[in-house]
Image: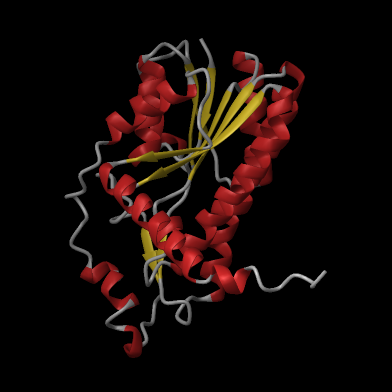
Amino acid sequence: MTTWLITGCSTGLGRAFAQEVLARGHNAVVTARDAAKVHDIVGAYPNTAVALPLDVTNDAQVTAAVTAAEERFGGVDVLVNNAGYGYRAAVEEGEDEAVQQLFDTHVFGTARTIKAVLPGMRRRRSGTIVNLSSIGARLSPPGSGYYAAVKAAVEAMTLSLRKEVEPLGITALVVEPGGFRTDFAGRSLTQSAIPIEDYAETAGQRRKENDTVHGTQAGDPAKAAARLVEVVESDAPPYMLVLGNDASDAFRASLDALRADLDTWEQVSRSTDFDD
């Protein structure tokens, strides 16, 4: 039995992760900004689950959640940084305050929870940190520049973290999902308030009023949760776990395009060293 601390469990993948972990007999600290929204999850598991309020932009709540996990279950074995939301805007349209909040939630919120659990993981010389990203970090579609940026930052930070903590018996991995049938493209999606007409055919096509994907995504959150637990429990979890046929196809296409660019411009790339 291991203890999981999962952020952003009120809906979507976070809720599915919590339900799967508890169904498999593990302990879980199930969190959401409004803890009342996860009481139904923990109600069936009074001995192995606790519901806590957690806004990852709030230092005190992050500390309190980790402390509660240590007092109730002895520590956090697996941290899942799932809390977050979408934001769509052309780069020029993005409001400063909204973009700062996006970074505070996804990047600095992830760093807050990581820094809170690592002292305990280092003492025990074991633990797993799972950070949720998105195929958007790979594709960077028009209208998602800021969201792609925060997820790319999470991915880069996770790769450095993995190299730092592996000698201590701890691992870190990124989950890069494609489209799953959650509230991400509905309630959890925000966007710039004032569109610029010149971007109507690029970023504008991804605005909420033009989105026809919500509720029809191929990805099954319950299956994603099951696969995640299996990967975490495997002997050698990968750095990057891509989830969904759409994500797998898009990831490979992105790699092929990058390699083609690298090959095309390789002579230029190799022409910048000092001549011996």
Left or right? Give the position of 217 relative to 273: left
Q: Residue at x 22, y 70 (%)?
A: 210
Q: Residue furthest bottom?
A: 198
Q: In which quadrant will I find the C terminus? A: bottom right
Q: Nearer the viewer, residue 184 or 139?
A: 139
Counting from the top left corner in percent of width and height, residue 57 is at 60, 50
Q: Is residue 145 shown above or below 132?
A: below
Counting from the top left corner in percent of width and height, residue 35 is at 46, 36
Which color mode does the image show? secondary structure
Q: Residue at x 55, y 67 (%)?
A: 266
Q: Is residue 46 shown above or below 59?
A: above
The answer to whether residue 225 of the structure is visible from this angle is yes
Q: How many callouts does the rendering have?
A: 0
The answer to whether residue 120 of the structure is visible from this angle is no
Q: Residue at x 79, y 72 (%)?
A: 275
Q: Residue at x 27, y 82 (%)?
A: 201
Left or right? Give the position of 7 relative to 134: right
Name the image quarter holding residue 189: bottom left
Q: Is residue 193 shown above or below 257?
A: below
Left or right? Give the position of 211 relative to 155: left
